Image (cartoon, rainbow, N blue to C red):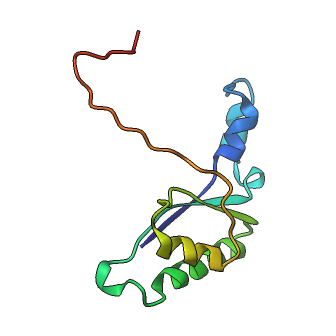
């Protein structure tokens, strides 16, 4: 399974939060402003892992994006310890561009440190 969508942030960012008076036009006609797709999720069921399916998913998704005119891809939210997916992605020449940290906090009535 693979979920890949156009990176609409490329059309939204230049608006600087201003949709009016003409920013809405850019949002309606976003295609010329967007040359990047984002891989949001990719997964293979456990019995089918380590059989090359991850690489095939990447390949098919890249080919579809190229056919549609996209020039770049961002593969986001790949967990650092998921070496199988990282190796599959790196085999296509992708390089790590950003690193995100995920933090967790229990929500309680006592929210110390929050004003």
Give the camera-side residue of 28 and 92: 92
Please name the residue shown 56% across and 76% down the image: 87
In the image, residue 101 above or below residue 106: below
Residue 11 on image: x %, y %: 71, 44
Q: Quarter of the image holding residue 65?
A: bottom right
Give the camera-side residue of 12 and 113: 113
Determine the residue located farthest toward the left in the rendered image: 109
Please name the residue shown 71% across and 54% down the image: 31
Please name the residue shown 63% across and 74% down the image: 90
In the image, residue 29 above or below residue 93: above
**Could you tell whether 107 is left or right of 97 in the image?**
left
Residue 5 on image: x %, y %: 56, 59
**Could you tell whether 110 is left or right of 54 in the image?**
left
Residue 72 on image: x %, y %: 72, 64
Give the camera-side residue of 17 and 39: 39
**Could you tell whether 115 is left or right of 76 in the image?**
left
Give the camera-side residue of 93 and 15: 93
Q: Quarter of the image holding residue 111?
A: top left
Please name the residue shown 71% across and 37% down the image: 13
**Could you tell whether 88 is left or right of 29 in the image?**
left
Residue 83 on image: x %, y %: 49, 72
In the image, residue 43 above or below residue 14: below
* Image quadrant containing the C terminus: top left
């Amino acid at each position: 399974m693979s979920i890949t969508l156009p990176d609409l942030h490329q059309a939204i960012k230049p608006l600087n939060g201003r949709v009016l008076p003409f920013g809405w036009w850019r949002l309606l006609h976003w295609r010329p402003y967007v040359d990047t797709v984002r891989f949001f999720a990719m997964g293979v069921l456990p019995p089918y892992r380590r059989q090359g399916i991850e690489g095939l998913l990447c390949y098919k998704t890249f080919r579809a994006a190229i056919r549609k005119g996209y020039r770049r891809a961002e593969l986001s939210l790949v967990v650092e310890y998921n070496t199988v997916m990282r190796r599959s992605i790196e085999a296509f020449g992708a390089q790590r561009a950003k690193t995100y940290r995920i933090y967790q906090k229990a929500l309680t009535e006592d929210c110390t440190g929050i004003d």
